[in-house]
Image (cartoon, rainbow, N blue to C red):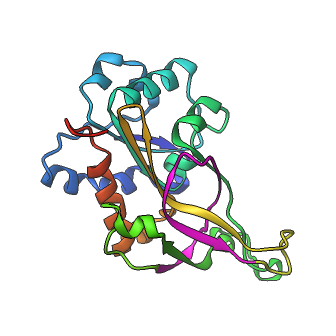
Amino acid sequence: MVRGGWEGHRPVEATELFIPFLERSGYAVRVEGSTEIYADAAELADTDLIVQCMTMSQITAEQVAGLAAAVVAGTGLTGWHGGIADSFRASSDYLHLVGGQFATHPGIQPCDRVGGEADNFLPHSIAITDLGREHPITAGIEDFDLVTEQYWVLHDDLIDVLATTTHPTREWHPWHRPVTSPAIWARHWGAGRIVVTTPGHSLDVLEHPSVRTVIERGMVWATRTASAS
């Protein structure tokens, strides 16, 4: 687990939620508080899965190159919310690796805002796609509703979109038609697998049964295996 960055996403508490699951599943968990480990090629070669929770922050060219090389060689990469979709904004190579980038989270009506994080909490749905209904990460999960940050994501078309969320038009927003963003996606990169789950702003969202199931299944699916392709 690689955690740190912006404290608002509670990187320590958030990652601690999933350590018991990993240990019960037979993983030996190592926790790193920075991205320096990404430059250690030998260590990553022995790592089957990286769970990253590193919102914003910075990464060196050597570190992102090491991360990308490890994924190409078969190391899995997964994470949630800003810990993977809003990491290292200045690194185009990192964005190329994960396939999607946080752009914004629309807010409530301006006259109702009080200056706290709840100004960006909107009721919205996570809709499982046809592909998602068949994929091992999301199979059997029904569409579900959340009241939290709704990520607007810029992305490429090399991702396998397992769930989406749609931003409606509202009179205080400048867009003129609904915009659908990927909410959960999987990605093959070389011999490696990547999973991004955009819900997860706070601990209560991570503990939502559907969100938690997706994240845990994503960890297992992304993990290097002899049959991964």
* Residue 145 picture location, percent across and down: 50, 81
Q: In which quarter of the image is the N terminus?
A: top left
Q: Residue at x 56, y 47 (%)?
A: 6
Q: In this view, does 153 lie to the left or right of 40?
A: right
Image: 206 above or below 36: below
State whether residue 96 appears in this view. Answer: yes
Q: Residue at x 53, y 35 (%)?
A: 97
**Magenta stretch, residue numbers:** 144-168
Q: Quadrant of the C terminus?
A: top left
User: What secondary structure do most residues of the magenta stretch adopt?
Assistant: strand
Magenta region includes residue 167: yes
Instruction: Looking at the picture, tell me which residue is in the foreground, 118 or 194.
Output: 194
Image: 116 above or below 160: below
* Residue 53 picture location, percent across and down: 44, 46
Q: Quadrant of residue 105?
A: bottom right
Q: Is residue 96 left or right of residue 23?
A: right
State whether residue 17 appears in this view. Answer: no
* Residue 139 picture location, percent across and down: 32, 69
Image: 2 above or below 219: above
Instruction: Looking at the picture, tell me which residue is in the foreground, 166 or 56.
Output: 166
Magenta region includes residue 116: no
Q: Is residue 26 left or right of residue 179?
A: left
Counting the numbered discs, the total is 0
* Residue 219 picture location, percent across and down: 31, 51
Q: Residue at x 35, y 52 (%)?
A: 15
Image: 116 above or below 69: below
Q: In which quarter of the image is residue 49?
A: top left
